[in-house]
């Protein structure tokens, strides 16, 4: 696992991005945040993160489509979906598209960190394989 | 008509839960950040420093309370198609009894079992049935103040069905409430103790599995919930 995981936050709510960035930074994570699926694709192409934290409902491309595109273009990047809406169909779709996991809002930062660590470990395991 | 109304309510609930979970996530994050910004030392300079910390903890606690409501709402609205497999009902019931046994003991509640042996396997959805049993057991335990008893039994109810019975010596249900206990959001529990969705979800699940839930209750004496499940004709006798 890298010393400091590189995480990209994708969420259209500015305050959510700002506070989550601070909370993760204080836990040693290198954070970058963008407000749309389109911006996420641009960022991942330039600077590949270890994990993308993806909101589902966003104007424009939306989280599920962005997840599919990221996995198609950068299969090594792990995508963790954060959403306020639990649906078996959505969860199934996320896994089928290659998403790492799904976390239902609201959650504790400790729970989120545990998922990020697990995603990083999976990414590393793929490299080792 | 009733089913149509419930379906509409389910959709509305899921939509609301989704919209509420997003601001809840923001509130929780802000409270966690504030907690981290108030590093030890800063609070000591305030005469009410301890109150500030208590207040922050309370915000997180109340967000988690809202979360249990919204997550229950999403659960209520979920249209899970049952995944049918051969199930040993005694095993499912016993698994859930074991889960609540510790809490029952802590509360001085005696848990008794009376499972009929050699029941046939039932073709049903095991995780969904577990959810129903856990809900009924939790309700039974929560209905008892002080010492009491929860008796769990299984038996062959007829040629084509099985019965699981959960009887408690708790507070019982007032006759005027009996008709409403399966309504979504109806609860007799204290604020914060129940969302009023447990029995409604349980009834929905059991109906989907082709069964029924009946209740008999007397105020001050306790309640008995009986779940009747059909034995699918392809079920074989369980040795």
Image: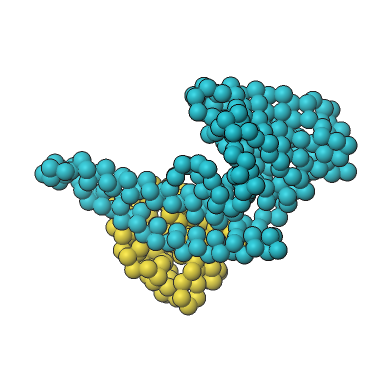
Place of residue B48 in the rendered image (x, y in percent of width and height, measured from the top left): 16, 43
Q: Is B41 or A6 nearer to us in this picture? A: B41
From the rendered image, report the letter of the chain displayed in yellow.
A
Image quadrant in which the C terminus of chain B is located? top right
Q: Residue at x 31, y 56 (%)?
A: B30
Q: Is A12 or B89 nearer to us in this picture? A: B89
In the image, farthest residue toward the left? B45
Place of residue B91 in the rendered image (x, y in percent of width and height, measured from the top left): 71, 32
Place of residue B151 in the rendered image (x, y in percent of width and height, measured from the top left): 65, 26
Quarter of the rendering containing residue A65: bottom right
Place of residue A114 in the rendered image (x, y in percent of width and height, measured from the top left): 43, 47
In the image, farthest residue toward the bottom? A60
Residue B185 in view of the camera: yes
| B72 relative to B225, above or below | below
Quarter of the rendering containing residue B47: top left
Q: Is B58 or A11 nearer to us in this picture? A: B58
Q: In this view, does A100 lie to the left or right of B131?
A: left
Q: Residue at x 37, y 45 (%)?
A: B61
From the rendered image, report the letter of the chain displayed in cyan.
B
Residue B199 in view of the camera: no
Image quadrant in which the N terminus of chain B is located? bottom right
């Amino acid at each position: 696992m890298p010393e400091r995981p590189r995480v990209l936050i994708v969420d259209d709510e500015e305050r959510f991005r700002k506070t989550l960035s601070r909370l993760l930074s204080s836990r040693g994570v290198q954070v970058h945040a963008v407000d749309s699926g389109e911006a996420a694709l641009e960022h991942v192409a330039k600077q590949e993160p270890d994990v993308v934290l993806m909101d589902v409902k966003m104007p424009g491309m939306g989280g599920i489509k962005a997840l599919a595109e990221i996995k198609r273009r950068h299969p090594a990047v792990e995508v963790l979906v954060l959403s306020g809406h639990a649906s078996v169909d959505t969860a199934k779709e996320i896994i089928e598209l290659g998403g790492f996991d799904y976390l239902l809002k609201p959650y504790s930062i400790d729970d989120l960190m545990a998922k990020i660590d697990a995603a990083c470990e999976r990414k590393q395991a793929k490299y080792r394989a | 008509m009733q089913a149509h109304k419930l379906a509409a309510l389910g959709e509305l609930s899921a939509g609301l839960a989704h919209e509420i979970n997003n601001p809840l996530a923001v509130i929780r994050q802000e409270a966690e950040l504030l907690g981290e910004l108030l590093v030890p030392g800063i609070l000591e300079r305030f005469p009410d420093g301890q109150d500030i910390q208590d207040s922050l903890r309370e915000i997180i606690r109340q967000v988690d309370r809202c979360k249990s409501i919204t997550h229950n709402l999403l659960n209520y609205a979920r249209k899970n198609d049952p995944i049918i497999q051969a199930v040993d009902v005694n095993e499912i019931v016993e698994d859930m009894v074991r889960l609540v046994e510790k809490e029952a003991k802590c509360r001085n509640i005696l848990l008794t079992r009376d499972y009929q042996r050699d029941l046939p396997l039932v073709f049903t959805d095991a995780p969904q049935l577990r959810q129903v049993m856990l809900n009924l057991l939790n309700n039974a335990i929560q209905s008892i103040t002080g010492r009491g008893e929860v008796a769990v039994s299984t038996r062959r109810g007829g040629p084509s069905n099985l019965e699981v019975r959960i009887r408690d010596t708790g507070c019982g249900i007032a006759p005027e409430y009996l008709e409403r206990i399966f309504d979504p959001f109806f609860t007799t529990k204290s604020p914060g103790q129940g969302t009023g969705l447990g029995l409604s979800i349980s009834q929905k699940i059991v109906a989907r599995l082709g069964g029924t839930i009946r209740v008999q209750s007397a105020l001050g004496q306790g309640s008995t919930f009986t779940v009747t499940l059909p034995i699918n004709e392809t079920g074989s006798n369980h040795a």
